[in-house]
Amino acid sequence: MKTSTAFGVDIGGSGIKGAVVDLEKGDLATERVKYLTPVPSTPKAVAEVVARLVEEAGWTGELGATFPAVIRHGVAQTAANVDKTWIGTDVDKVFTDTTHCDVTVLNDADAAGIAEARFGAAQGVGGVVILLTFGTGIGSALLVDGRLVPNTELGHLELDGYDAEKRASSAAKDNEGLSYKQWAKRVQRYLRHVEGLFSPDLFVLGGGVSKHSDKWVPLLDISTPVKSAQLLNNAGIVGAAMAAHEKFTH
Ligand code: BGC
């Protein structure tokens, strides 16, 4: 029996990563290749990198791509941490034109959320699950009994007069030189706020800093159970490939 596969690309503020994904195992079937996100990260420049990843892999089939913005029916509606010219751009069409693949695009945290729900920390968890990714911004995925409510953008909740991700993302930690303890206090304040709004059954915490989750997750004092993301660096790639295969159309 031929294994079912799709190509996943994860587009972030600093890197663009891609690999073929084994959709039965929820794991990479080829080695992950990473290029730096071009500066400025214009549609043309990013599409060229995506095309290079696909060409180098000799891939012609289903292609899923994550994007760090609200994505409605393939079109970017926002651009918090990428070039502003993306707003209103049909990301799906831009990537289809450059790769000639069957393209599906979705929000980066949503991709991580569906991957963690199927293969990772939220596997088999019913009720309301919120995955939050801490990186350049804060991404969110809301799942209800394993089904995604797309584009929740909980990183942009206003908290203490600030856009929450400006104070509690891992970029804020780095930019302000905060210790894990100082930063965990901000994350805790943020999680308590989200907890008050949604009463989730589980938080899954991911993003680049989830590699060092032992340094900050145990410091969090909140009521909701917390798990660290399990797919780490690959959640976006796996979720993108899943979305492509399942013809995700939000
Ligand atoms: C964007 C989201 C994205 C998150 C993580 C936020 O600034 O608005 O769409 O999911 O960053 O990349």
Image (cartoon, grey):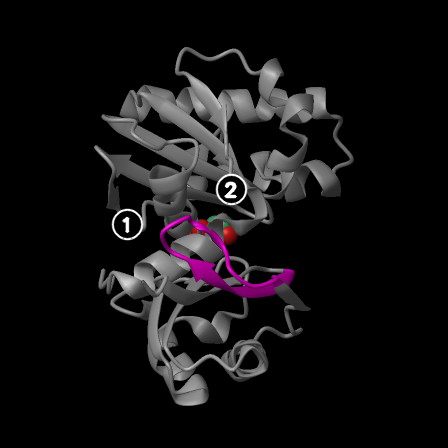
| Figure quadrant of the N terminus | bottom left
Name the secondary structure under disc 2: loop
Judged left or right of residue 232, residue 34 is right
Q: Amino acid at mark 2?
A: Leu
Residue hosting label 2: 231
Residue 18 location in percent, x, y?
A: 54, 66
Whether ligand 1 has any atom under 8 Å from the Cβ at mark 2 is answered as: no
Residue at position x 42%, y 49% in the image: 26
**Magenta-colored span:** 14-32
- Tell me the residue at 52%/84% (across/down): 44
Between residue 97 and residue 58, name the one nearer to us.
Answer: 58
Spot occupied by residue 178 in the image (x, y as percentages of width and height)? 74, 30
Image quadrant where residue 100 sits: bottom left
In this view, the residue in front, 221 or 15, is 15
Q: Secondary structure at mark 1?
A: loop
Could one spot residue 53 in this view of the protein?
A: yes
Ranked by sequence position, the earlier of labels 1 and 2 is: 1
Amino acid type at circle 1 is Pro
The reply, left or right, for residue 248 in relation to residue 5 is left
| Residue 172: quadrant of the picture | top right
